């Protein structure tokens, strides 16, 4: 028989065993039941938050939610954010529809360090990391007049009925495929933009009732790092496309960097005007590296404006070509000087200083009489632009934008040029000028033969200095040109061969009667070219400068009366 002492001992063992089994059953039930409970709660919270925040316009759906409660991890698969077309049309009818309609989907959204207890008890969503891999986003934009200047809810007002706060240590979006379609009424047809690869990292995101007052945060975050690849934007017609290989931006170091920017014509030079049926300037812009430092991050991300202390542009190309074999359409170009176009732009910019380096500028024409093309070019262009802006407040403080550049004309003559634009002037006032030394004039033959049916056989410029003051309607120019031994051949096009041939008699007249061989001549003072040019309505900015130079130089080189 068991002793009286062994009976309590056995009871203790049975109680312990029973308690262990009971706890084990509770753990098993919890491991099975709690994820289901929390998953249902999380599912309800997410779906309710999306519906409430969008006034029932959007719904979020997904295939499954996986939860690991001890680690606070969650994974949502096959996520889709879709709009309700019926609700959207109702919002359109009552003039409450948003400008943007969004469609999102992702194969997987991973969350780690989710505090489910804080979510259920305190209505505070706290997450360590959110990773969204290879999402696809489509945004359709249709500007609504009634959305301009109206009251809007803050992000906190959109969530405060469901959550008291949202805090996320890190958000990462990897390899986003982004498409933006603009259906604005002002456009003749929808314009589609695409971004093939977008990478976004957001650090320390906090949204609560006080976070919008924290000046250290941008869009409620301590840092936003953006990297985009393969950007393509339409130009508004079928002639150009804007491409960008890579863009990087970080709010922490306030730097924006862009690689391989190309505003590219979609047709070759000789096909461009042929398709249009009229002579048009074909513009080809390409820059290897553009970097803005000390960027105003709030204006860039929130207001979509670019303001920075410095902008660096390296290894650029500006190639302009016009095929004059096609008819010229007269177009009123009043108000289209570079600074006037800048002021008309809706995109606000402001740079204390722009630094240009290793840029090539080229202008070419195809002549209808010679059926040849000629071009002038400026290589190794470098210099600065100060106070480049279209912001009214900046202009009130300083209305002058100044360009100061050094370059080599036709890869030979060293040219120093400047432009001074009055941004506050109503009449488009600007001033420009330049100085060039030591230039062999026969270097221009590719241009003069093709465009003017003339060949420079000899001549050397020792000094060229010009100054132009202009407005919308006129330009006043003063030019000094010192040169020696100027001789030319007048040419004609052979009707049988199409080749250019020398016109002997006219060449003799030009060299012996018309042209001044030297300036200054002997003991005479150097001739000065002065002219007042009345601008034609269809005359562009660069045409006005070239026209003014041509007239003033003609006054110096032609005529032997003085």
Image: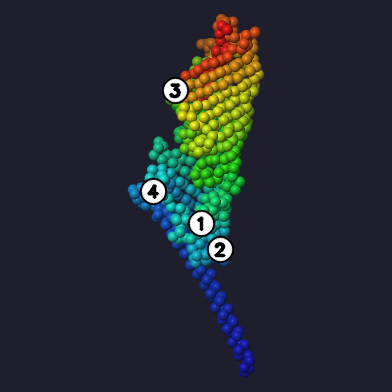
Q: Dot 3: few (<14), some (14–19), or many (≥20) neighbours within 10 Å?
A: some
The correct choice, above or below, for 58 with respect to 196 in the image is: below
**Upstream in the sequence, badge 2 or badge 1?**
2
Q: How many marks?
A: 4
**Upstream in the sequence, badge 1 or badge 3?**
1
Secondary structure found at label 4: loop
What is the distance, in whole Å, between disc 2 and disc 1 at their CAs?
26 Å
Reading the image, the residue beneath label 4 is 97
Residue 89: percent from left, percent from top? 35, 49
The correct choice, above or below, for 91 with respect to 457 in the image is: below
Residue 502: percent from left, percent from top? 57, 9
What is the distance, in whole Å, between disc 4 and disc 3 at their CAs?
43 Å
Residue 197: percent from left, percent from top? 54, 45
Residue 315: percent from left, percent from top? 61, 33
Secondary structure found at label 3: loop
Q: Which residue is depicted at the point 54% across and 78% down?
A: 22
What is the distance, in whole Å, between disc 2 and disc 4 at their CAs?
38 Å
Q: Which residue is depicted at the point 50% across and 49% down?
A: 136
Reading the image, the residue beneath label 3 is 537
Give the side of residue 56 with respect to residue 524, left or right: left
Q: Which residue is depicted at the point 47% across and 25% down?
A: 472
What label sits on residue 484 in the rendered view? none
Secondary structure found at label 1: loop
């Amino acid at each position: 028989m068991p002793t009286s002492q062994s009976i309590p001992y056995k009871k203790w063992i049975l109680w312990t065993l029973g308690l262990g089994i009971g706890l084990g059953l509770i753990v098993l039930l919890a491991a099975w039941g709690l994820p289901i409970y929390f998953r249902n709660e999380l599912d309800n919270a997410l779906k309710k938050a999306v519906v409430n925040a969008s006034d029932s316009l959007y719904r979020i759906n997904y295939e499954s939610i996986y939860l690991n409660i001890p680690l606070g991890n969650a994974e949502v698969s096959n996520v889709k954010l879709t709009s309700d077309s019926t609700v959207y049309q109702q919002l359109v009818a009552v003039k409450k529809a948003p400008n943007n309609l969004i469609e999102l989907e992702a194969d997987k959204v991973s969350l780690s360090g989710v505090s489910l207890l804080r979510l259920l008890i305190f209505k505070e969503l706290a997450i360590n990391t959110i990773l969204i891999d290879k999402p696809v986003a489509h945004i359709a934009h249709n500007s609504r007049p009634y959305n301009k200047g109206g009251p809007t809810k803050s992000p906190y007002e959109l969530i405060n009925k469901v959550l008291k706060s949202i805090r996320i240590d890190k958000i990462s979006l990897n390899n986003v495929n982004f498409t933006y379609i603009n259906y604005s009424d002002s456009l003749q047809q929808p314009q589609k933009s695409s971004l093939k690869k977008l990478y976004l990292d957001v650090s320390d995101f906090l949204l609560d009732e006080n976070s919008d007052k924290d000046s250290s945060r941008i869009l409620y975050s301590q840092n936003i790092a953006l990297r985009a690849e393969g950007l393509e934007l339409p130009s508004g017609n079928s002639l150009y496309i804007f491409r960008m290989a890579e863009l990087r931006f970080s709010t922490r170091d306030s730097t924006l960097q862009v690689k391989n920017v190309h505003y590219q014509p979609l047709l070759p030079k000789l096909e461009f005007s042929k398709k249009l049926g009229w002579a048009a300037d074909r513009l080809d812009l390409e820059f290897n590296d553009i970097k803005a430092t000390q960027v105003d991050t709030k204006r860039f991300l929130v207001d979509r404006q670019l303001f920075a202390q410095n902008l660096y542009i390296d290894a650029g190309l500006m190639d302009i070509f016009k095929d004059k074999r096609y008819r010229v359409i007269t177009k009123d170009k009043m108000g289209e000087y570079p600074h006037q176009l800048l002021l008309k732009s809706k995109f606000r910019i402001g740079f204390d200083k722009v630094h240009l380096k290793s840029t090539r500028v080229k202008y070419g024409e195809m002549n209808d009489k010679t059926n040849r093309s000629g071009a002038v070019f400026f290589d190794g262009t470098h210099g600065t632009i100060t106070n480049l802006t279209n912001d009214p407040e900046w202009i009130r403080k300083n209305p002058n934008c100044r360009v100061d550049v050094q370059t080599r004309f036709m890869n030979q003559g060293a040219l120093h040029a400047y432009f001074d634009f009055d941004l506050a002037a109503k009449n488009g006032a600007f001033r420009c000028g330049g100085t060039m030394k030591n230039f062999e004039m026969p270097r221009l033959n590719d241009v003069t033969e093709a465009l003017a049916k003339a060949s420079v056989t000899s001549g050397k410029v020792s000094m060229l200095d010009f100054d132009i003051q202009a407005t919308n309607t006129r330009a006043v120019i003063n030019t000094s040109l010192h040169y020696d031994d100027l001789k030319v051949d007048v040419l004609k096009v052979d009707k049988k061969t199409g080749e250019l041939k020398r016109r002997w008699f006219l060449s003799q007249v030009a060299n012996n009667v018309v042209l001044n061989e030297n300036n200054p001549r002997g003991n005479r003072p150097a001739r000065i070219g002065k002219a007042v040019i009345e601008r034609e309505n269809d005359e562009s900015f660069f045409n006005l400068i070239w026209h003014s130079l041509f007239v003033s130089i003609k006054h110096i080189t032609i005529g032997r009366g003085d």
